[in-house]
Image (cartoon, grey):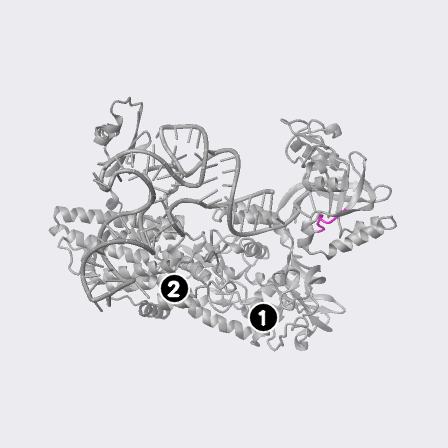
Amino acid sequence: MDTRYDPQAVESRWQGRWAERHAHEATDGTGRAKFYCLEMFPYPSGRIHMGHVRNYTIGDVVARQRRMRGYDVLHPIGWDAFGLPAENAAIERGIHPAVWTRDNIEYMRGQLQRMGFSYDWRREIATCDPEYYRWEQEFFLAMLERGLAYRRKSLVNWCARCQTVLANEQVEDGRCWRCESVVEERELEQWFLRITAYAEELLTGCDALVGWPEKVLTMQRNWIGKSIGAELTFPLADREGGITVFTTRPDTVFGATFVSIAVEHPLVAALSAGTDEERAVAEFVQHVRAQSTAERAVGKDGVFVGAYCRNPFTGARLSIYAASFVLMGYGSGAVMAVPCHDQRDFEFARAHELPMRVVVQPDDAPPLDPARMEEAYVGPGRLVGSGAFDGLPNEEAKLRITDAATAGGFGSRATQYRLRDWGISRQRYWGAPIPVVYCDTCGVVPVRRSDLPVVLPTDVELSGTGGSPLAKLESFVRTSCPQCGGPARRETDTFDTFVESSWYFLRYTSPHEDTRAFDRDALAYWLPVDQYIGGVEHAVLHLLYARFFTKVLRDLEYTGPSSVGATLDEPFVNLLTQGMVIKDGAKMSKSKGNTVEPDYLVQRYGADTARLFCIFAAPPERDLDWSDQGIEGASRFLHRLWRIVARGREWLAAARAETAAGAARPAASDGAGAEQARALRRLTHRTITRVTEDVERRQHFNTAIAAVMELVNGYAELVDEVPPRDTALRAALAEAVGTTVVLLAPFVPHIASELWEAIGGDDLDAQPWPAVDESALAEDVVEMVVQVNGKVRARFSVAPDTADEAVLAQALAHERVRAHVEGKAIRKTLVVPGRLVSIVV
RNA sequence: GCGAGAGUGGCGGAACUGGUAGACGCACUAGACUUAGGAUCUAGCCCGCUCAUCGCGGUUGGGGGUUCGAGUCCCCCCUCUCGCACCA
């Protein structure tokens, strides 16, 4: 063993050995408990960044530690390989997306391997492989059959110059990111997945996700946005029909003084037709519709449509306004306006000089006067001016008024969700084809399952203009109708890439299965994922879609009861969302030019140092501040540990062998040596306790490292080339050093393996996680703190089992305590066993 | 605006159930070893008073409260970060 630590040599040696031995492959049920550890798979963008290093290091620590704990661990990796950057590369540099993606995967795979991540490489998948996406096409067909997938017109961002649809991310200040022409909205037929059918289950399911951060659950709940209220129909005045509104405040219906409807609402044109307002309304509608969503969010404009409706409870005539802030996509696209009890309605009413009625009076405040109100009153209270409902607390009135509306036939209870169905069509080339064809006689026809996969052709021309390259590829577009055999055209849109990432974690359980999507038994054995780790930026989209897909695939019976498992309702039991990597106060990103290249770190310091820094510098959920000195510190620790072990390796190995052989120990151990040995063993076993807790329960990996450093500090000066004469101390040192190496194995596996070998250990990968020797933890003495009036005045040692009275007597006898107590009356004393004595004078 | 999270030394961060605030690391200072070192080792390192050890006082964004005891619990306020942003 060299006395100098050479990370590159150590790392390539062990990485080679792991690959040879297939060291980290899951074994699929050998009677051991399973543990599925998963990190969000990367997009093959070219090279890994520090965010990946951090994410995958955290995951690797968990995976390696659970393996040592005896679990059968599944720790897979793959590539979220479809997506826009590949197309951009093609357009800008003339490289085919498939080639670009494959090359990136090759390079990044090498990078991940050089980091020493313990993946089961046999299970590697890339979502752009037809062997992968064919199952997704099949799921889509099954969803189509069940009405869970459907087609309707919807608005897209369209660049007329480039002749293409733009993703929201490609619209910058309302302009095309590439040619800077103004982006238009266009209505296109799009495919949707009916995620709203699962809104309620996705919402209530959150309650069971106790292993998820509260933050993420809150974001999901808000995203789903359930509102309970009522639908009320306001009959039109002077003509047939009515306007249905959704409200969460049916208790305020007597205070409604007008009705606002969305500019897209079909009644806008119908009602204004033939009135004096017709022209003004048309202009307003056109004006608002030309605005971007952002512009629309600013103003609270509206215009009278020239017609009236009636309050179904009072019969009062209410004017109808077309208003910019009413959304066609939520509720019924119409709202009853109650200026006194809704802030937007209040502002709108003031601006348009519309009447205001107070119908809820707060209990403990002066009565509200509409003329003097400065803002709407939205708090609780009792009803006034509400006919038969006067005097009711408003919460109760919600139910009573809704019941009355139901009885009267003009209303009902209603629940609304903010969640919209998921539009999955992308007018993009580099994605999985949507497996349907369009036939002039039969209409929309699904591709036969036996004809799957619909393979994405590679012989396309990518110019970035003129629409989807698939649409121009005759050999792809022209096909025959599966139903009538006549000529038909293929769908040229591809799936949103979030579709691929919604089920990849299921596929890892049987990635090479080619006759069905999943081996049910394998899936039931491995799922759910025990620990999922990724960036919080996926808190809503990916994590919600994945939950949705899990439930859909359950209902389509792709997953489900089998010999080894029950129904899979939720994919991820525990979720860890790691923070961003920050440098110079901003997230590391290419555009800001503040990146640190993982390759550079590996070359300069080694993978173990990079891993150690990521783990040690911050707890995982917090942002990680990059620091050049921090990585030096991590490197220094590993070099120091190397030197310590190198210094004593021969006798350490011998001492370990002796202990393993059960050789008699206590022979040559004097009082001082025995005392030192006991103290060291206490430190060693306390460290095992702390590290185990930190890794398994608290997931505070940074403090786990701190604990190991304390252990090393505790024995560093005792390790010398010459072994200590005392055999007990020698054994305790060998144990301490061995424990250090084993505890560090999940974090810095290469150097740990090398050091383990140096001190005579065999296969570190097969080494169990250290067990705590409870007897070693026992303290001979405990330090007691004495507080006088809450201030620490003295400390002294006692045997841990000393009676409280004896402890108190000893505390009072302490000279420093006496100095503070003398001449004063003791009002109260308190003994917290093993901790402190509190005296109040 | 709503929701969530966070404010602790010069810095990253510890302190888990209310019980020694500042673990561990970085930076810094002094010394040792050295031709030299940005290597390594030893010691110091929250602030103030004190020559200094001892000791005393103060200190977890600010203010108040509960308690023998509060970074931790409760109330009010301030600042920052993230998410959703007209959702009726």
Q: Is residue A509 magenta?
A: no
> Does residue A333 show up?
yes
> Three-letter amino acid code at disc 1?
Asn
User: For residue A789, which quarter of the picture?
Assistant: top left
> At which x and y percent is residue A744?
32, 57
Residue A88 disc label? 1
Mark 2 neighbour class, 10 Å CA radius: few under 14, some 14 to 19, many 20 or more:
many
Q: Is the C terminus of chain A in the top left, top right, bottom left or bottom right quadrant?
A: top left
The residue under label 2 is: A24
- Give the mark, 1 or 2, whose residue is nearer the N terminus: 2
Q: Nearer the viewer, residue A712 or A354?
A: A354
Main SS category, magenta section:
loop
Specify whether disc 1 shares its chain with disc 2. yes
Q: Is the N terminus of chain A in the top left, top right, bottom left or bottom right quadrant?
A: bottom left
> At which x and y percent is residue A237?
84, 41
Q: Is residue A694 above or below residue A101?
A: above
In the picture, measured across the screen, residue A152 lies left or right of residue A304, that is left
Residue A683 disc label? none
> Three-letter amino acid code at disc 2?
His
> At which x and y percent is residue A270?
83, 50
Q: Nearer the viewer, residue A282 or A386?
A: A282
Q: Are marks 1 and 2 in contact (CB under 8 Å)?
A: no
Magenta stretch in the rendered image: A322-328
Q: Label 2: state its secondary structure.
A: loop
